[in-house]
Each structure stands twice: as structure tokens, then as C-alpha cells.
Amino acid sequence: MAIADLFKRFKGEPEVPEEDENEKKLMDLFQKRHVMKKMYDKAAAELASKNEEAEALQRQAGEMGKRLGALDEMLSDAEKGQSVIVHYQLAALWAECNIQLAVRCQELVSRHEADEKQAQMLEFASAQRLKIAAAEERVFAAQRPLEDVLERKRQLEVELAASQRFWHYFKRRKLAVSLAELGEQMGPLQKARQTFAEELDKLKQTPAPEYPGLTVGAKRNIDLHLIALAQYLYQTLMGNSVAQHAQNTHGQLPNATVFGDTRTCLQMVSQIAESAGKLKTDTERQLKLGQRFAWLQENATYAKPEDPLPARELYLTIEGKVGAGTREVKPFDLDAGRIPVNVVDNDYFGLKDLLLK
């Protein structure tokens, strides 16, 4: 026996069996292992996240290096260097159109969310008023018979208190029976009243439901507005194929396209600037957008009740005569003035990522 055990026995302390000590040590080891496992998993997750960030930075650095290399290659040639200017002018125009779509999307989402939240709150408040009024009526209806019984009980108790002479013996017995019957009646009445009162309190404390998100109708409205804006942007920039060049150039390296000699590039820069100016100076912008949205809304069909995006037939082409403001517009092709451009499937100006599909 160990000296420590002898000392414990001398002090009168209970002797701990060796098996219990071993079991305690084993449990401590398991607990420590569990803590270490959690710490390891956390560190591994953090390391994986850092590795992903590092890989992303490496990819960005590689892409930036490619772009810089492309710039060096293009700028070293005076003739090709003009194409770089055209590239960045087109990229800036594409970005401006994308920003307009993104801002419009955010405005519409915020407006619809605010309207729907307000409507939901009004509907909830109205429904709550009706429910609370009905619950209060139930409490009142349950309270009335209870008060009648209590009033009758008080009357009998007063009568019983006044009937204490010996000749009132039989009367007292009768009153006692009546009081007992009233007592039996009070139990269910009090329980019913308590139940209705609890239901009323629960109703009054019911929180407003959480906003579930935009309805299908709101999403459809937003998507049609965005399609209308993308079509308007294309129609405004379609002169000299500026819109098409901007879309084709998006995401490409600066040296991916040679737009021609210096004279051609300078001419394109002028055309791009002119097209960009149209976006800023079009006094009929809101009128055209309103007309185009109204036409899309009128002609939109949906494959399923839950689909926010209309059927493809609606946006396979751009109706050239729609959204033309007050000016007379000549047909762009032989197909009744339709422009054969699908702004959705071709993802013009980053439209796809903004649509609420």
C-alpha cells in the first residue's frame, strides 16, 4: 500500500479504489483528446481558408500579370496601342451600363421589399385586431356566468349568515347544499375563463411574422424592368455596333482584339464617346423605359406560376418600335422593326446575374 493511502487511512479519509482512479484518469484523457480534436479541426479549417485565399490571390496576381504583359505587348506597337485605348473605352462603357442595371435592381428590390413589408404588417395588424376582439368577447362571455355564480354565492352566504337560529337548521342544510352546487359550477367556469384569458394574452404577445422575401409578382416586375433597361441600353448604343463591341470586349485581355489602324481606332473612340453621351443626354429616357416596360408586361407569359422570368419568346428580340419616345423610328430590319438581339441569354451588360431567377 502506498504511503499516501496510509496517510489517508490515518486521517480517516475514504480509500479510493485503484480502479476508480484509473477510470478517472481515462476520462480525463478522453476529455483532453476531445478538446485537442476540436482545436485541431478549427486550426485545419482556418488553414484551408487561408490556403484558398492564397490561391485566389495567386490567380488574381497571375491574371494581372497577363494583363500587364498584354499591355506591354500592345503598347510597344504604336499602331496596336490605339486598340488598347478602344478596349478600355468599351470596358468603361460596359461597366457604366452594368452599374445602371445594378443600381436599378437595388432600387426596385428595396422599394418592393418596403411595400411588401408594410402590406404584411398592415395585414398582420388587421388580423390581430380581429383575433383579439374575438378573444376578448370569449373572455367576456366566460366572465359573465362566472360573475352570476359568484353573485349568487354571495347572496347565499349572506342568507346563511343570517340563518343561525336553531329553527333555521333545515334552511342551513339547504343553503349548504346550494353553496356546494355553486362551488362545483365555479370550477369549470373559472377554468374556461382562465383558458380564454391565456389565449388572449398569447395573442397580444404574438410577434409579427418574419418577412419571407419578395413575392413572385415583385420578382416578375423587377425582372421586366431590368430587361427593359438592358434593351434600352442596347438600342441607345447600337449605332456603329458600339453595344456589340462593348459586350464582346468584356472580360477579354487588352490585347485580345485589334480594332484596326490608328485612324479606325480614333474613329471608334469618337463613336464610343458619342454613344456614351446619348446615355447621359437622352431627355426621353424615362418615357422610353416606361413604354418598353409596359409592352413587356403586356406581352409577358410564364411557363409556371412560380417562374419570375418570362418565357424566352418575350426577349428573343428587341422590338425596335417600342420605347422610341415621341420620335418616329424606322424599322431596323425586315421583321417589323425587330432587333435580333437576346439581352438575357447573351448576358448583355451583366444582366443575368441581376435577374431574380
Image (cartoon, rainbow, N blue to C red):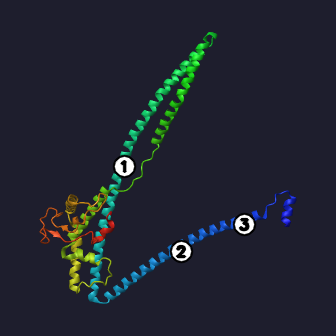
Residue 196's place in the image compared with 299, above or below, is above
Q: Is residue 187 above or below residue 174?
A: below
265 vs 40, nearest the viewer: 40
Name the element at disc 1. helix
If you read the primary sequence from the N terminus, does the residue marked by circle 3 or circle 1 appear first?
A: 3
Q: Nearer the viewer, residue 338 or 109?
A: 338
Cα–Cα gap, marks 3 and 2? 32 Å
Q: Nearer the viewer, residue 306 or 341?
A: 306
Per the image, the residue denoted by label 1 is 120
Is 5 placed left or right of 338 in the picture?
A: right
Q: What residue type is labelled 3?
A: Lys
Residue at figure coordinates x 74%, y 66% from the top left: 22
Residue type at tag 1: Gln
Residue drawn at x 18%, y 70% as measured from the top left: 339
Q: Residue at x 35, y 53 (%)?
A: 114
The image quarter containing residue 98 is bottom left
Eye-nearest disc, 3 or 1 = 3
Packing grade of label 1 (10 A; few <14, some 14-19, many >=20) is some
> Which class describes the residues within 10 Å of circle 3: few (<14), some (14-19), or many (20+)?
few
- Identify the residue at horizontal 76%, vertical 64% (top origin): 19
Q: Position of residue 356 (x, y in %)?
A: 33, 63
Q: State which quadrant residue 174 falls in.
A: top right
Residue 258 position within the rendered picture, expressed as x and y whole percent measured from the top left:
26, 85
Alpha carbon separation for disc pair 3 and 1 = 59 Å
The residue beneath circle 2 is 47
Please name the residue that numbered disc 3 is placed on: 25
